[in-house]
């Protein structure tokens, strides 16, 4: 409710707090104002009586540095004042009781695990797909059958081990949008095609970025047909990590059918998110098509949300797009992934490592 700055000067703000305290539709009151004032306009006796009645929690958030006069007056009246809006919201959340169903505990994140530290220390601000999947693997997610090749012979050998059909993709932090630069080859079915794809992909990478940071070519098993889902997180400066799920591929840009929640979420919370999509019926068996088991998707959403919470000090953004949910209910495949580190962030206590593979033409 915007009661204007005049209410601070006339005593109207305290009258409004008094009225709201009697409302059954109000649980707590946070007064947002500026307490950078030379003269304190509140009736201190009225403020003290209001605080003593304790009908509803109420306190002040000052969006500017409060004067000592204002802080002293509020403190003497038994009213709290803060300049930390995130802390104020956290306090209200604690006062409200247990978190709503579907949300995970926002406890202090554990120390970075060694394997995750190693990946982050050797990475740029933008992690390649194969690096993101190394981190996912630490969280128990086997994203896809794949191997990183740094030479033509390695690419052909990896193709033979993985089996056909295959996908081959450029891996460079300078080229996150691989499809747009011709950095993806689909439906590779022989060693000769794998060899040809290797040269084409290296040429495409060097044609668009000079190839200065080409890490290799990812050789990956083709995923079965299915629904394309996007799972992502972004770190909001005030709210912390937020997780998102929706229909992926180009559909996320075309229809923007996505649902957001504060991270972390539980598997139950992830199921609620999926049910909240406008296109949720497509997963439930629309027009005679077989229903999709949303369990694996919900577990992946919950895992990614927990990852985002635990790595919030190091990571700004995670995007898995598309995640292909197999139509035959045989699971899912993370077909592409990226992770963006916080600007200018280095992993504490770990020296920068030069452990990147060298691509051989």
Image: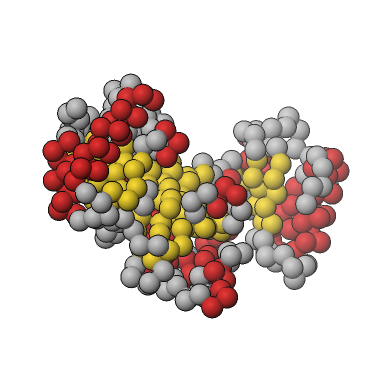
x 55%, y 53%: residue: 251
Residue at point 77% right, 56% down? Answer: 17
At 69% from the left edge and 45% from the top edge, which residue is drawn?
32
* Left or right side of 148 for 43: right
Q: Can you give x and y, in whole percent of width and height, for residue 22 in the image?
A: 78, 67
Q: Position of residue 245 (x, y in %)?
A: 50, 57
**Residue 298 or 85: which is nearer the viewer?**
298
Q: Nearer the viewer, residue 231 or 32?
A: 231
Whether residue 196 is situated above or below residue 311 in the rendered picture: above
- How was the colour assigned to the protein in this rendering? secondary structure
Q: Is residue 112 at all visible to an observer of this figure?
A: no
Q: In the image, is 139 to the left or to the right of 158?
A: right
Left or right relative to 47: residue 156:
left
Residue 205 located left or right of residue 318: left
Which quadrant holds residue 304? bottom left
Q: Quadrant of the C terminus?
A: top left
Q: Quadrant of residue 282?
A: bottom right
User: Nearest the camera: 118 or 210?
Assistant: 210
Would you identify the image quadrant in which residue 353 lies?
A: top left
Tell me if residue 34 can be seen: yes
In percent of width and height, residue 253 lies at 57, 47
Q: State the count of labels.
A: 0
Give me the residue at 84% from left, 40% from top.
6
Looking at the picture, how far across and down is residue 78, in whole percent? Answer: 63, 53
């Amino acid at each position: 409710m915007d009661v204007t700055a005049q209410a601070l000067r006339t005593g109207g703000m305290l009258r409004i707090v008094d009225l709201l305290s009697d409302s059954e539709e109000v649980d707590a009151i946070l007064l947002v104002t500026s307490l950078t004032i030379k003269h304190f306009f509140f009736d201190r006796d009225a403020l003290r009586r209001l605080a003593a009645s304790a009908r509803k929690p109420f306190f002040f958030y000052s969006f500017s540095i409060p004067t000592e006069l204002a802080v002293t007056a509020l403190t003497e009246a038994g009213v709290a004042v803060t300049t930390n809006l995130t802390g104020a919201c956290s306090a209200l959340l604690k006062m409200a009781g247990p978190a709503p169903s579907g949300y995970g505990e926002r406890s202090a994140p554990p120390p970075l695990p060694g394997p995750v530290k190693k990946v982050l220390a050797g990475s740029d601000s933008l992690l390649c797909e194969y690096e993101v999947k190394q981190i996912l693997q630490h969280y128990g997610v086997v994203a896809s059958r794949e191997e990183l090749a740094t030479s033509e012979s390695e690419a052909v050998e990896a193709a033979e081990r993985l089996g056909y059909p295959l996908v081959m993709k450029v891996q460079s932090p300078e080229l996150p949008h691989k499809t747009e630069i011709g950095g993806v080859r689909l439906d590779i079915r022989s060693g000769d095609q794998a060899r040809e794809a290797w040269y084409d992909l290296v040429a495409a990478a060097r044609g668009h970025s000079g190839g200065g940071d080409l890490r290799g070519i990812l050789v990956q098993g083709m995923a079965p047909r299915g629904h394309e889902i996007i799972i992502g997180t972004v770190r909001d400066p005030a709210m912390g990590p937020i997780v998102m799920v929706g229909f992926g591929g180009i559909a996320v840009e075309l229809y923007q059918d996505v649902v957001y929640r504060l991270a972390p979420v539980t598997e139950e919370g992830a199921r609620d998110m999926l049910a909240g999509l406008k296109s949720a019926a497509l997963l439930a068996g629309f027009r005679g098509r077989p229903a999709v088991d949303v369990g694996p998707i919900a577990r992946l959403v919950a895992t990614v949300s927990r990852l985002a919470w635990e790595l919030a000090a190091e990571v700004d953004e995670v995007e898995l797009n598309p995640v292909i949910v197999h139509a035959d209910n045989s699971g899912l495949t993370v077909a592409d992934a990226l992770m963006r580190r916080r600007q200018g962030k280095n992993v504490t206590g770990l020296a920068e490592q030069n452990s990147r593979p060298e691509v051989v033409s």
